[in-house]
Amino acid sequence: MDSLLQAPDAVETLALYGRLAFKEELRRAIAGGETRPEALLDRAKSSLARRFSPTLTRAINATGVLLHTNLGRSPLSRFATEALERVSFGYTTLEYDASTGDRGRRQDHVRGAARDLFGCEDALAVNNNAAAVFLALCALARGRRVLVSRGELVAIGGSFRIPEILESSGAMLQEVGTTNQTSIEDYRRALSPSTALLLTVHPSNYEIRGYTQRPQPRELAELARSAGLPWVHDQGTGCVEPLEEFGVPGEPTVAACLADGANLVTFSADKLFAGPQAGFAVGQASLVASLASHPVARVVRPDKLTLAALAATLAAWKQGKWRQLPIYRAAGAPLSGLEERGENLRGGIARGEAALTVEVMSSTALFGGGTSPEKRFASRALALAHRSLDASELLARLRQGQPSIVGRIEEGRVLLDLRTIAPEEDGSVGQSLSALSEIP
């Protein structure tokens, strides 16, 4: 072992990975039956490179889904990344008031800006929307009943299910109405002395069509007020501005939900709000105060990096710079610009005997990420076909490249949707396509 570690070929590896890790990999190689010194060193180096290679890496989203949950939902804006850079080195004034020298409160970095933007009495930031809902139920309904329409017992992904969140919080679920038909009278009949609150959930990742009925917001507000109960609305998507200009009508904004009479509104910050992963609970000051003082609030509080990115994103919205946020810049890109970019990428591929063929074709994109289900808008995509690689193999080559390019397959061809590829990523896409065109 000493002779292997002292070999000239081991110097660089020792400097990169350290003596302990290097010895572990050499022992594994020896246990595998290898005896040649050169082969042992090579095998250990390869194993160490795999072992310490980061798994959280940059990816290019070419799926056409702007808020792709598996790819991190909303990409951070330059406003947010600049804020992260400012606070990521050294110490910060996270809970310190530099003007007085006294202890500060971390929520104050976003609290006032959130109140101003959403037009609410108070606001609380947590680490995601599930945490906001859970905290609200813990603080306001533990041991008591929560009325929820059967048509709103949603599941988001595989782990956020309204009935399970209720059970975990210590609140008790009382279903009202039916899957497709719930009236205000259903809520009224379900009221009892043990009722803690009314919970409504925006169906952000599904639609119920046909013979349906839901109470009007004013009806819910009046019932909650007359019963002396809070109405908590899980808006979910964090929509700040109407999306009609992007071809997505009817998405309720957070401010509209508050104006409709909801006492507390919860939502994600990494969806249509276009910030980092976080959640907000905004609304009536007394309710927000109950959440903030609950022990679970400390469990779900955001860290300094999240707060910095949230504050920068709040400022961008308030300053009217929201169209510069990546998802809105992408959503608002004109088709002519997408076509021009597509033709430029297509023109960079050698003609004639090239193994890869590239066409620019019509496509459809969507916000995704549990928002605006089935509401698509026009886009353009690169359609790829390869002489010797089928669509699955071609997609895998793109996915396994550096950086990873994630597309989709339609009708036997790989599509790279240009609406979700940032213009500054075109160079990387072009390099990957050129490399694929050279594969015989």
Image (cartoon, rainbow, N blue to C red):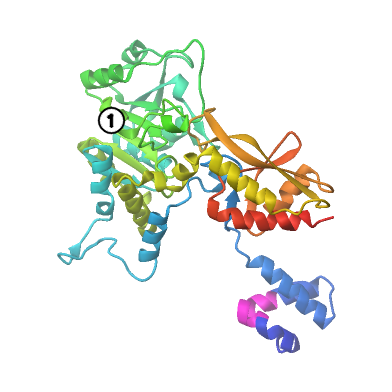
Q: Foreground residue, 215 or 194? A: 215
Q: Residue at x 51, y 12 (%)?
A: 210
Q: Quadrant of the N terminus?
A: bottom right
| Whether residue 106 can be seen here | yes
Task: Name the secondary structure under disc 1.
Answer: helix
Residue 89 position by quadrant: bottom left
x, y percent for residue 3: 75, 89
Mark 1 belongs to which amino acid? Answer: Leu
| Whether residue 142 can be seen here | no
When the figure is inspected, residue 379 is found, relative to residue 317, above or below; the finding is above
Instruction: Judge the density around disc 1: few (<14), some (14-19), many (≥20) Cα neighbours within 10 Å.
Output: many
Residue ID for mark 1: 258
x, y percent for residue 28: 75, 72
* Count of marks, rendered view: 1
x, y percent for residue 6: 71, 89
In the image, is 306 to the left or to the right of 61? left
Residue that sits furthest to the left in the current view: 100
Q: Magenta stretch: give its range.
A: 13-24
The question of residue 419 being in magenta is answered with no
Q: Residue at x 54, y 50 (%)?
A: 422
Q: Foreground residue, 258 or 96? A: 258
